Amino acid sequence: ISEVWQIMLPRKRKLWPITALNLAYSIAKDRSEDPYVQVGAVAKKHDNSLIVGYNGAPSGVEIDWSDRDQRRIKVVHAEENVLNYCQPGEVEFLACTHIPCPSCLKTLAIKKVPRVFFREFLENYQAETSFEIAKLFKITLLKI
């Protein structure tokens, strides 16, 4: 009877930031067309609803993915995509596969997102700049 009881016990759930990061990686892998870097982001609202986004072309725009420099100026970042569906102050935190760039940090500040959890740094990327801008905008960046 004790074995049956153990099976019926609820399993321990992961913390929201970990769950959101796992979802961000999944959406990036499954949806991003960018052959160089796949980025995913998840906004967790105060009501516990989640919104997902990934890096890619704006709707109706074709990108020549073979031209790395040209694709950079056309790609919409995952953070921008997800925050398009959020009002200022309604996001508890954002989970992103990679540290947000300075431009995305401005969008995060406009949307009043207080914390960003991320897991990776981009290659050849000035992470110090992101940390400086985040501090200026009072956004906490947490690498987990």
Image: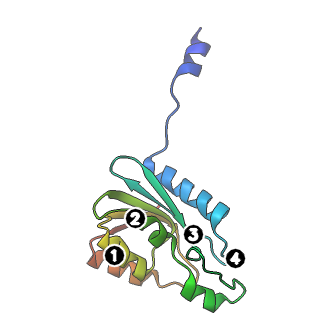
Q: Amino acid at mark 3?
A: Val
Element type at mark 1 = helix
Residue 76, given in percent of the width and then of the height, sits at 52, 77
The residue where tag 4 is placed is 35
Q: Are marks 2 and 1 in contact (CB under 8 Å)?
A: yes
Which of the 4 image quadrants contains residue 27? bottom right
Q: CA distance from mark 4 to mark 2?
A: 25 Å
Label 3 vs 2, first from the N-terminus: 3
Question: Please, which residue is most extreme toward the top here?
Answer: 1
Q: CA distance from mark 2 to mark 1?
A: 9 Å
Q: CA distance from mark 3 to mark 2?
A: 14 Å
Residue lying at 69% horizontally and 85% vertically, measured from the top left: 64
The residue where tag 2 is placed is 116
The residue where tag 1 is placed is 134
Label 4 vs 1, first from the N-terminus: 4
Side of 65 relative to 27 (left or right)? right
Element type at mark 2 = strand
Label 3 vs 1, first from the N-terminus: 3
Element type at mark 4 = loop
Q: Amino acid at mark 4?
A: Pro
Residue lying at 67% horizontally and 78% vertically, measured from the top left: 36
The residue where tag 3 is placed is 39
Residue 26, given in percent of the width and then of the height, sits at 61, 57
Residue 70, given in percent of the width and then of the height, sits at 62, 91
Q: Amino acid at mark 2?
A: Val
Report the front residue among 78 and 8: 78
Q: CA distance from mark 3 to mark 1?
A: 19 Å
Residue 42 against residue 108 in the figure, above or below: above
